[in-house]
């Protein structure tokens, strides 16, 4: 068995369509998911994800993200917030909401 798993997002195992964008998922290694997310202007957690969050008012997941393009704003349940732009690497704890800032698509790599 080879020691390297290689996948491509243009052959994603699943594509999740959202109101304002889409997410491409591939799995590598021991089934670890990696997502490429393309969020259009107007994308926000409340409209695009909360309907799938089973009653959660903010995201219950931890994210490790790299912003490939665009700008996104995160608001934590405790009121702290940050704005991330292309080139930023983030570790985001559970209890956050987010939205695209501006007129440019936001593209994220999330694992």
Image: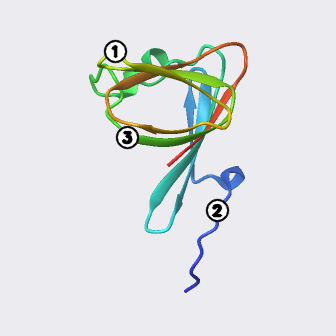
The residue mark sitting in front, 1 or 3, is 1
Q: What element does badge 3 sit on? A: loop
| Residue depicted at x 49% and y 49% | 111
Q: Earlier in the sequence, mark 1 or mark 3?
A: 3
Name the residue at the bottom extreme.
1
Place of residue 40 in the rendered image (x, y in percent of width and height, measured from the top left): 66, 22
Q: Quadrant of the rendered structure where residue 105 is?
A: top right
Residue 79 tag number: 1
User: How far apart, in angstroms, are the residues tagged by discs 2 and 3?
Assistant: 23 Å
Give above or below for 32 relative to 6. above
User: How far apart, in angstroms, are the residues tagged by discs 1 and 3?
Assistant: 17 Å
Residue 62 tag number: 3
Place of residue 66 in the rendered image (x, y in percent of width and height, measured from the top left): 59, 41
Place of residue 81 in the rendered image (x, y in percent of width and height, measured from the top left): 43, 19
Q: Earlier in the sequence, mark 2 or mark 3?
A: 2
Give above or below for 69 relative to 109. above
| Residue depicted at x 58% and y 23% | 72
Q: What element does badge 2 sit on? A: loop
Q: What element does badge 1 sit on? A: loop
Which part of the image, by quadrant, shows the N terminus? bottom right
| Residue depicted at x 69% and y 26% | 70
Q: Is residue 85 left or right of residue 82?
A: right
Residue 7 tag number: 2
Q: Quadrant of the rendered structure where residue 51 is?
A: top left
């Amino acid at each position: 068995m080879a020691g390297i798993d290689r996948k491509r997002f243009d052959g994603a195992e699943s594509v999740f369509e959202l109101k304002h964008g889409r997410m491409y998922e591939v799995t590598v290694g021991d089934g670890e998911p990696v997502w490429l997310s393309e969020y259009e202007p107007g994308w926000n957690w409340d409209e695009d994800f909360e309907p799938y969050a089973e009653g959660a008012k903010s995201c219950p997941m931890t994210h490790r993200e790299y912003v490939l393009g665009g700008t996104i704003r995160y608001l934590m349940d405790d009121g702290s917030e940050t704005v991330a732009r292309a080139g930023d690497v983030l570790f985001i704890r559970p209890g956050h909401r987010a939205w695209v800032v501006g007129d440019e698509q936001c593209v994220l790599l999330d694992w």
